[in-house]
Amino acid sequence: MIDIRPAPGGIICEGREVTVVFNRDPGDARCDEARLDPEVQTGSRRTFRADGGWRLSFAWDHGGALTVDYAAVICDYEEPILVAVTPEQGTLVTARELEASGIVLEFNAPVEAPNDQPNRAFRIAQVDGDAWDLAVSTAGRRVTLRVPAGVIEPGRSYVVTGAVTDERGNETEVALTYVTVAADE
C-alpha cells in the first residue's frame, strides 16, 4: 500500500470517501467498517464509503492488511435552505429594479457562492437566448446578485441559476425566473 486518504488520525464521518492507493492491483480489497463504492473496482486505487466507525480494518488478496484509526464525527449533510428572495420569484420586475437593487437571497445558514467553478457560478439568461455572469457578494446568510447594466430588456423572461455551499460543503442549487416589464407598467 502506498497511500490512504484521509490520512490516519484525520476526521471521518459516515459516507465519507476513503481512498486507498496500492503499488499494484490488490485484487479483492475489503473493509469491515466501509463499503467499496462502486462495488467493482480494478487497478491500484480503491474507493470506500465509511460506515461511521472510527477504526477501519482493510484486507486484500495475498495476505495484505491495514488498520487505521480516525477521529469519527457526526457530519451534517443538510443542505442550506433558501428562505427568502427579493424581488420575489415570479413577480413582474423592471430592468431598473434588477439593476439597481440586484437579487438578494437569504438562506437558513451562512453560505458561500463558488463563482470560481463555471458550472456553479451565478448567471442570468434570457429564456430563449443570451446569458451573462452575475456579480456575487456574500455576507453570512445573505447572497446579493448584481445584474450587468444594460442587458435586461422589458417584456422578456429571465432565469437566474447558480449554487451556494455551506461551511460543511453541502450544496444548494438555485433557479429563479423573472419576467421584466417596462417601467411605466
Image (cartoon, rainbow, N blue to C red):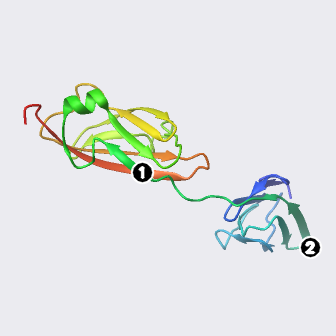
Q: Kindly identify the amino acid type of the residue bearing the numbered disc 2.
A: Gly
Q: Position of residue 135 (x, y in %)?
A: 39, 30
Q: Position of residue 23 (x, y in %)?
A: 83, 57
Q: Quadrant of the N terminus?
A: bottom right
In what element is the residue under mark 1?
Answer: strand
Label 2, residues with CA under 10 Å away: few <14, some 14-19, many ≥20? few
Label 1, residues with CA under 10 Å away: few <14, some 14-19, many ≥20? some
Q: Position of residue 22 (x, y in %)?
A: 82, 59
Lower position in the chain sequence, tag 1 or tag 2: 2
Say which quarter of the image contains residue 147: top left
- Distance from disc 1 to disc 2, alpha carbons, whole Å, reads 51 Å
Q: Kindly identify the amino acid type of the residue bearing the numbered disc 1.
A: Leu
Comparing 77 with 7, the one in front is 77
- Please say if the residues under marks 1 and 2 sit with CB atoms less than 8 Å apart: no
> Residue drawn at (25%, 38%), measured in percent from left and top?
130
Q: Is residue 146 above or below residue 81?
A: above
| Labels in figure, total | 2
Q: Which residue is label 2 attached to?
A: 63
Q: Residue furthest left?
A: 185
Q: Is residue 175 above or below residue 86?
A: below
Q: Which residue is label 1 attached to?
A: 82
Q: Residue furthest right?
A: 63
Q: Quadrant of the C terminus?
A: top left
Comparing 167 with 57, the one in front is 167
8 relative to 141 in the view: left or right? right
**Tag shown at residue 61:** none
> Residue drawn at (34%, 45%), measured in percent from left and top?
85
Q: Is residue 24 above or below residue 122?
A: below
Comparing 64 with 8, the one in front is 8
In what element is the residue under mark 2?
Answer: loop
Mark whose residue sits in front, 1 or 2: 1
